[in-house]
Amino acid sequence: MQQVVEACARTLKMIFQSSIAPTNDMLVGQRMEHLLALLYNGNESVVEVAAHILARCCETPQHQQAVVDTGALERLTNLLSESVRRREASLDGLASLVKNNPQISMRLVALDQGKALGSIIKFVKDKAPRTRFLACMCLANISRSCPYSYPQEWEVRANMLAVVVKLLEESGQVGEDSTMVLADIVANNEELQRAAYKFDAIVKLCALLQRGSLSTKQLEGVLMSLAELCSRLEDSRRQLLDQESGKAVCFRGLSLETLILTLKNTSLD
C-alpha cells in the first residue's frame, strides 16, 4: 500500500509542476484534508510531494486560507525540526502561504510564541544552499506582506542580504530564484540598497546578464533587482553604467530613470 501512495504522490507532483494544474480542484470536498494527512506520512518523498502541492495551491488569498484552515500551517512548522528534505519542503510551503498575505504572515510570526519564526531565521545561515534560499524567501515574503512585524526584522534582512547575494552565484534553481528574493529584500529600503552596493550585488547581477542564456524568470528577477538597487542611489546607477551588460540594459533613447520606473511597474511575459 505504501508503494501505491508514493506512486500516486509522484504523479501528483508531475501534474502540479504544470502552470495549468487544477489547483481549484484540490479545494473540493475532502481533498485538502487528505493532502494534509500525507504530511504525516513516514516516507520523506511523500511528505515532500504533499508540501510541494500545498505550495502550488496558494495562488490566491482564498486558496491560502483554505490551506491554513486544514491545519497545514501548524503541521508545516512542525516539519522544521525534522530532516533536511522535510524542513525544505516545509519552508517551500510556508513561503507560499505567507506570500502577499498579511494575516497569515502575522499568524506565522506569532505561532508558538515566535519559535517557528526563530527556526526560520536560524536556517538563513544553514549549511545547505537550498535551505538558506528557502528560509530567505519565506522571510522576504513575510517582510513584503507585513513590514516590521517582528522586532529584529531589519537585522534579519541585512543578514539575508549577504546570504542572497552569495546565492546569486549558485547553479540551478537556487541561483535562478535568488534574483527575485534579492529584489524583495531591498525594496524601498535605501540602507539595504546601500549595503547591497557594498556587497557588489550590481556587479554580480550584470555578470549574469553577460553570461546570457537566462530563463525568462531569472531575467525578470535580475532586472527587478537592478531596478530596486538603482531606484535611489546615484552610486548604484554609476556602477550599473560602468558594467558592459549594464550599458546594454539602458536602451537607446530611454533614460535610466524611465527604465527603472518601467521595470518596477511591469513584469516580463
Image (cartoon, grey):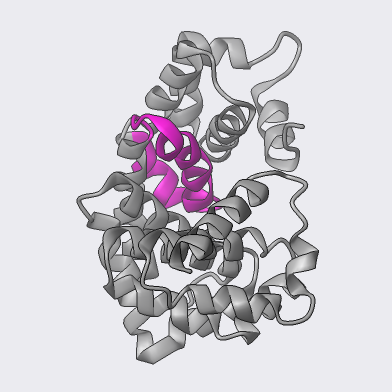
Q: Residue furthest front?
A: 1
Against 217, residue 83 (above or below) is below
Chain part drawn in magenta: 168-197
User: Residue 171: where, in percent of width, then height?
Assistant: 37, 29
Number of labels in the image equals 0
The quarter of the displayed image where residue 170 is located: top left
Residue 22 visible (yes or no): yes
Majority secondary structure in the magenta region: helix
User: Residue 69: where, in percent of width, then height?
Assistant: 64, 86
Q: Residue furthest bottom?
A: 113
Name the quarter where the C terminus is drawn.
top right
**Residue at 59% in and 73% down:** 35
User: Residue 190: where, in percent of width, then height?
Assistant: 47, 49
Residue 151 visible (yes or no): no
User: Residue 118: where, in percent of width, then height?
Assistant: 31, 76
Tell whether position 34 is magenta: no
